[in-house]
Amino acid sequence: MSYMYFLGVLVNNPAVRLSQLHAWRHETELRSLQPRLDAYWAADSNRPDGTDAERENYYRQVVAPHEDAFLADFPQGVPERTAWEVILREENWRSVLKNWRHDGQQIFEFAPDLLAMLADTDVKELQVQNLRMPYNTFYVALTPGHFLPDYNSDWVVDGFYITAEICLVDSLRLRPLPPNELIAKRRKQWSALERNPGVLESLRKSGTESFASFDSYIAELLAENAAAQQLYDRYLLDPDAVMDEIAAKVDIRGSGEWRSYLTFGVDFTFRRRDNAPTSLSLTDLLGQPTLRAYYDFVSHRNTVADSIERGRRSAIPMDTFREEDGHPDDLRNVISDPTVLEEVTRLVFNLVCYLNYPERDQEKRLSDPRVHERVRRAKGKARKMAEARARQDGCRWINFCGYRTSFDRGKMLGGTAVGHWRRGHWRNQRFGKALAESRLLWIRPTMVGADKDIIDSRPTVYGASQ
């Protein structure tokens, strides 16, 4: 077997050990604590929708004992606020994993050479108007310890989840329901409310006059629907004008408007440096680091830098689940660490840009190469059966990106510098009739300022044909 063939096999058959990825590992790590967490969340989520007195009584009799028992299990001397951080962090993971599974358990892995090129690519001046998330929630697997290797002495970054809110463009493109369909749909919901008088009474006491009767309830909804129809019609005629108008309202304090162009959160995952997925104690969880970023783009004209500045003003570009905004003495709080924020932003947005890049190198493969080949060779119904069997056996589809990409930063030859690398960047390229459409164009990192005769040639890697 030739070396080139062997190299091609490696390129075309990258492997992912599912048991080592966060979603599967986290279940093992929380094995001893999961029953306690589940019991607390079940009690908390079943709070009645009755009167204030009923809800308060339920909390004191049902929820509070779970909280007290949980907090008592933490090591002596741990502040209650710190213990709550751990509980809130696990509640966040529960929500993130639920969304990830709902959206198809999508996993992306990026080749090291591609990551090296993207690390040399600027994103701050990128306008986000051409970005679309491939899925509402997806996971990016990273080589453990390669990103922010010194962030924590005991834990290493091994990936992150992106959870996106619906893009404003997508919501504006949704045609409002015709009035007759809206009335029929809401009549069913009103009947459900009438069967639960406690909830309906609570809504009426909150001061919302529309819940006085079905007629007042539907009248308000029809008025809102008519306004949505007008907005929809205007958007079809002039999308930019409508989105600019919405963005202006969002930035007015007290306007009550919250319809950002794009919003998403990034939750980084960590594993122990010894790579051992083992059951964690509350003491272990106290030492587990947190790295979480949040990006809010009010306008489609916003750049990545605009979003970061907006986040700084709100004190939430990153957080550690504390109730207060600023904790400069807490080393886990990275809001005031521009180095970490810069690296996180460059990594996240370069990967998202690449997933929006029309010429991206991406291949979807099952996590077991041998099973993938069996499924690939099957035809028709046999293929569907083979794929179903593979999923039952624990295989998952992985999106491999850039495994046919090769990148070499160049070397020193005889002590002579071979020039320097010019950073890459992304820009929006206009195309189509009257240049009315645009797409992302990647200007890759390039070597400049060197004699072509002394620059090391960059090797070409050929993938094995299938």
Image (cartoon, helix red, strand yellow):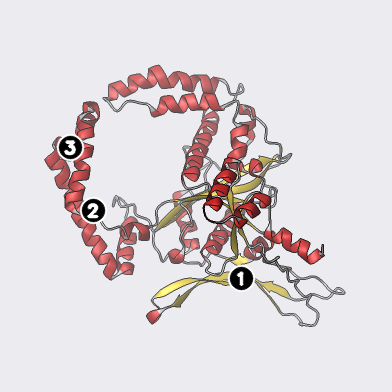
Q: Residues within 10 Å of mark 3 (few under 14, many from 20)?
A: many
Q: Earlier in the sequence, mark 2 or mark 3?
A: 2
Label tally = 3
Q: Residues within 10 Å of mark 2 (few under 14, many from 20)?
A: some
- Point out residue 90 in the picture as x, y percentages from the top left corner: 53, 35
Which element is circle 3 on? helix
Q: Please identify the quadrant where the N terminus is shown.
A: bottom right
Find disc 3 in the rendering and name its residue: 211
From the viewer's perspective, is the residue at label 2 or at label 3 nearer?
A: 2
Indicate whether 42 appears above or below 232. above
- Point out residue 223 in the picture as x, y percentages from the top left corner: 17, 51
Q: Amino acid at mark 3?
A: Phe
Q: Quadrant of residue 422?
A: bottom right
Q: Earlier in the sequence, mark 1 or mark 2?
A: 2
Find disc 1 in the rendering and name its residue: 424
Looking at the picture, tell me which residue is in the foreground, 12 or 38. 12
Residue beneath the point at 80% across and 70% down: 411
Which element is circle 2 on? loop
